[in-house]
Amino acid sequence: MSATLIDGKARAAALRAEVAIGVAAFVAAHGRAPGLTVVLVGDDAASAVYVGAKGKACREVGIISGEHRLPADAAQADLLALVAQLNADDAVDGILVQLPLPRHIDADKVIAAIDAAKDVDGFTPINAGKLAIGQPALVPCTPSGCMRLIRDALGDISGAQALVIGRSSIVGKPMAALLTAASATVTIAHSRTRDLAGHVARADIVVAAVGVPGMVKGEWIKPGACVIDVGINRIALADGKTRLVGDVDFDGALARAGWITPVPGGVGPMTIACLLANTLEAARARATT
Ligand code: NAD
């Protein structure tokens, strides 16, 4: 048996096309396009690449993309003042403060200052709390993308055993909340978990979000399981080149799983597509309140 590959690139393209149609309808109804503003502090090269990719993706679906760059030594007060200014700006529907922030800035404080109605990353305590208690919320993009892939592959997952490996606030915890809301029976594994192999062997759905290349072994996977690999790890090859791999031993898992996401081309492309969907959702909600 060989697993069906989940094509995140194609699914993300379909979602972006859906968003583009929704954006056109929003413009027709409200006479303006939704706006997403990204704030980048410092000159982290990877962050600059992400921010550039987000701007391009916005423009492709008709969302107005704004960008503010602050120097690496910017004062926290200046960043908070910028967030307050964007909160008050009616043309801005989504605010995204690119993480990580420089060490002298309290990221929790900055995130909490974002108007929850514009929190398209879903990271504010208000949106995280709403998700945790099952109220409608702006949901973090990566777990939201994983959930769409899982639903496409499996349909109804009520009663399924789901294992989320990783308990971060941006992936693991919201992922577990979404799976719970979909009536799966959810286990969260983390760095102190005993017998990870045993947990994986019982899971119909495995979501790996750890950041350790190939840590989930193929032989642990329950035959037919749906495997969602969030990990993005760059490893060095013998020839001096590098390659991106996930947290799952892909070749081993391919032989046992029912469905599996590749890295790259699985979860990754869904994240930006879900950001666009969240921006449209925020714009719609703000336009009706
Ligand atoms: P994180 O470092 O915040 O969290 C990692 C989690 O793994 C922690 O909760 C920790 O308890 C758990 N963990 C560590 N060792 C473990 C072990 N031996 N067994 C079980 N659990 C263990 O990371 P994160 O921000 O949640 O990201 C996780 C991975 O997902 C990273 O590779 C990151 O690059 C990737 N990521 C991808 C996307 C995407 O768009 N595809 C988005 C976000 C993160």
Image (cartoon, rainbow, N blue to C red):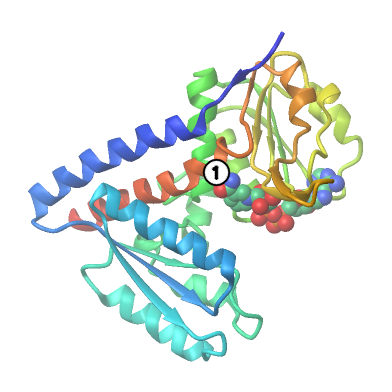
Task: Give 249 or 130, whichever is nearer the viewer.
Answer: 249
Q: Where is residue 66 in the image (x, y as percent from the top left)?
A: 31, 69
Crowding at label 1, few (<14), some or many (≥20) Cα neighbours within 10 Å?
A: many
The answer, for residue 93, to whether it is visible in the render is yes
Q: Which residue is drawn at 54% across and 46% down?
A: 142
- The number of numbered badges drawn on the structure is 1
205 is higher (above) or lower (below) than 54: above
Q: Which residue is drawn at 35% across and 56% down?
A: 56
Task: Give 114 or 149, whichever is nearer the viewer.
Answer: 149
Q: In which quarter of the image is residue 4?
A: top right
The residue carrying mark 1 is 268
Task: Give 133 or 48, whichever is nearer the viewer.
Answer: 48
Residue 168 in the figure: left or right of residue 189: left
Residue 136 in the figure: left or right of residue 92: right
Q: Which residue is drawn at 60% across and 39% down?
A: 264
Q: Position of residue 247 (x, y in %)?
A: 74, 40
Query: Can you name the residue that lies furthest to the front here?
Result: 239
Q: Which amino acid does label 1 sit on?
A: Gly
Q: Residue at x 53, y 20 (%)?
A: 153
Q: Position of residue 172 (x, y in %)?
A: 65, 47
Q: Where is residue 73 in the image (x, y as percent from the top left)?
A: 56, 90
Query: Can you name the residue that lies furthest to the top here?
Result: 1
Mark 1 within 8 Å of ligand 1, using the beta carbon: yes
